[in-house]
Image (spheres, helix red, strand yellow):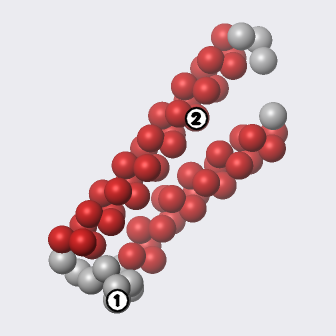
Amino acid sequence: MLNQITLIFSLMTIFIASPVYAHHDEIVGDGLEHELFHALLWGVAIAGVFVAVRWYKRNKNNGG
């Protein structure tokens, strides 16, 4: 179970830290693509947190 939690937090950290790298990405540029990239990554990060909280609450209620 600790390995699953470590994996979840590692993936969340990667997704949250990724927008920092987008600022210097010459492929994406500074226009609409740049903003869409940020929106996509923040959406994935928020979805990851939502799933992690839901998983935690479900396992807490089941005694696991």
Instruction: Name the spot of residue 4 as percent of width and height, x first.
Output: 75, 41
Q: Residue furthest top?
A: 62
Q: Residue furthest left?
A: 32
Say if 15 sits above or below 28 in the image: above
Q: Is residue 46 left or right of residue 27?
A: right
Q: Quadrant of the N terminus?
A: top right
What label sits on residue 36 in the rendered view?
none
- Looking at the image, residue 13 lies above or below residue 32: above
- Is 40 placed left or right of 1 in the picture? left
User: From this viewpoint, which residue is outermost toward the right?
Assistant: 2
Q: In the displayed structure, would residue 40 be above or below residue 23?
A: above
Whole-angstrom CA distance, mark 2 to mark 1, is: 33 Å
Circle 1 SS class: loop
Please identify, in this view, whether the residue under mark 2 or under mark 1 is nearer the observer: 1
Asked where in the image residue 46 lies, by quadrant, the reply is top left
- Label 2 sits on a secondary structure element that is helix
The amino acid marked with disc number 1 is Glu
- Residues under numbered marks 2 and 1 in contact, where contact means CB atoms less than 8 Å apart: no
Question: In percent of the image, x 55 and y 25: which residue is there?
Answer: 54
Neighbour class for label 1 at 10 Å: few (<14), some, many (≥20)? few
Q: Position of residue 56 (x, y in %)?
A: 63, 26
Number of marks drawn: 2
Mark nearer the N terminus (2 vs 1): 1
Q: Does residue 32 appear to the left or right of 40 in the view shown?
A: left
Query: Where's residue 60, x and y in %?
Result: 69, 17
Position in image of residue 21 (x %, y %): 45, 77
Q: Amino acid at mark 2?
A: Ala
Mark on residue 26? 1
Q: Is residue 64 left or right of residue 24?
A: right
Residue depicted at x 78% and y 18%: 64
Give the residue number, with chain letter if any, for mark 2. 52
| Position of 46 relative to 41 (above/below) | above
